[in-house]
C-alpha cells in the first residue's frame, strides 16, 4: 500500500500560529487534525519569561565575589569574546528550538527574539548589580559594564531556556 504524504498548513487559532497536521486513516481519508503551536511570534508573555529566566541565574552569579574580581582582572577582549559566544549560543538555541523548519518568512521575529533575550538579560543583570552596589556607575563605568557582560553570560542562557517553556 502506498503511503500518503501528510501536508501540514499554518493557521492562526485563538490568536496564535499553529501548524495543522492532518491525521489519515488507512484509506487515506482525513480522520482528524493535530495542532502544534508555532512559537515564532515574539509576544509580551515571552518577554516576561525572558526577564524571569534571566533573573534565575543572574541573582546567584551576581552575588559572587569571584564575578566581581573577574570583572577587574579579565582582559576586555575576553569579555567581548564571552559576549559574542553568549549571543552565538542564544542564536543557535533559538534557531533550533523555534525556527529550524520555518526560518524563511520569520527572520525578523528570529532576530527580535535573539536581541531581546540578550538585551533584557543585560538590563536585568545591570539592575541587580546596581542594587547590590557592585556597578560603580560614575566612578568606573567600564568596570560596571565588564561585570554586567560577565554575569549576562549565564543569565542570557537561562533566559533563552525559560523562553522555550510554554
Image (cartoon, helix red, strand yellow):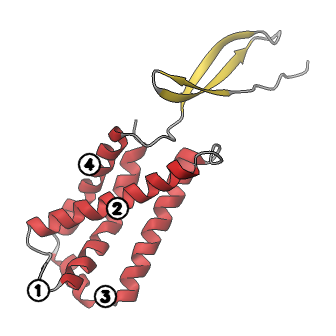
120 relative position to 88: left or right: left
The x and y percentages for residue 35 are: 57, 23
Q: CA distance from mark 4 to mark 3?
A: 28 Å
Q: Are marks 3 and 2 in contact (CB under 8 Å)?
A: no
Q: Give the structural element (helix, strand or loop) at label 4.
A: helix
Which mark is drawn over residue 52? Answer: 4
Instruction: State the residue position of label 3.
Output: 74
- Going from N to C along the chain, the mark reached first, 3 or 1, is 3
- The residue sitting at 63% across, 43% down in the picture is 102
Q: CA distance from mark 4 to mark 2?
A: 14 Å
Q: Dividing the image into 4 quarters, which one contains the N terminus?
A: top right
Q: Are marks 4 and 3 in contact (CB under 8 Å)?
A: no
User: Residue lying farthest right?
Assistant: 1
Q: Nearer the viewer, residue 81 or 9?
A: 9
- Going from N to C along the chain, the mark reached first, 3 or 2, is 3
Residue 31 position by quadrant: top right
23 relative position to 112: left or right: right
Which mark is drawn over residue 139? Answer: 1
- The residue sitting at 19% across, 60% down in the picture is 59
Q: CA distance from mark 3 to mark 1?
A: 19 Å
Which of discs 1 and 4 lies nearer the camera? The answer is: 1
Vertical order, 13 against 140 (above or below): above
Vertical order, 7 against 24 (above or below): below
Amino acid at each position: 500500500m502506498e503511503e500518503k504524504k501528510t501536508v501540514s498548513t499554518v493557521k492562526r487559532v485563538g490568536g496564535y500560529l499553529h501548524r495543522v497536521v492532518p491525521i489519515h486513516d488507512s484509506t487515506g481519508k482525513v480522520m482528524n487534525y493535530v495542532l502544534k503551536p508555532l512559537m515564532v511570534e515574539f509576544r509580551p508573555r515571552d518577554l516576561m519569561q525572558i526577564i524571569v529566566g534571566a533573573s534565575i541565574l543572574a541573582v546567584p552569579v551576581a552575588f559572587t565575589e569571584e564575578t566581581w574580581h573577574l570583572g577587574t582582572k579579565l582582559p576586555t577582549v575576553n569579555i567581548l569574546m564571552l559576549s559574542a559566544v553568549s549571543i552565538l549560543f542564544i542564536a543557535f538555541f533559538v534557531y533550533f528550538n523555534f525556527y529550524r523548519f520555518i526560518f524563511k518568512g520569520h527572520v525578523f521575529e528570529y532576530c527580535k527574539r535573539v536581541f531581546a533575550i540578550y538585551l533584557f538579560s543585560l538590563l536585568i543583570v545591570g539592575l541587580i548589580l546596581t542594587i547590590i552596589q557592585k556597578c560603580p556607575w560614575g566612578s568606573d563605568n567600564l568596570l560596571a559594564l565588564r561585570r554586567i557582560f560577565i554575569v549576562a553570560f549565564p543569565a542570557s542562557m537561562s533566559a533563552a531556556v525559560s523562553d522555550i517553556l510554554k
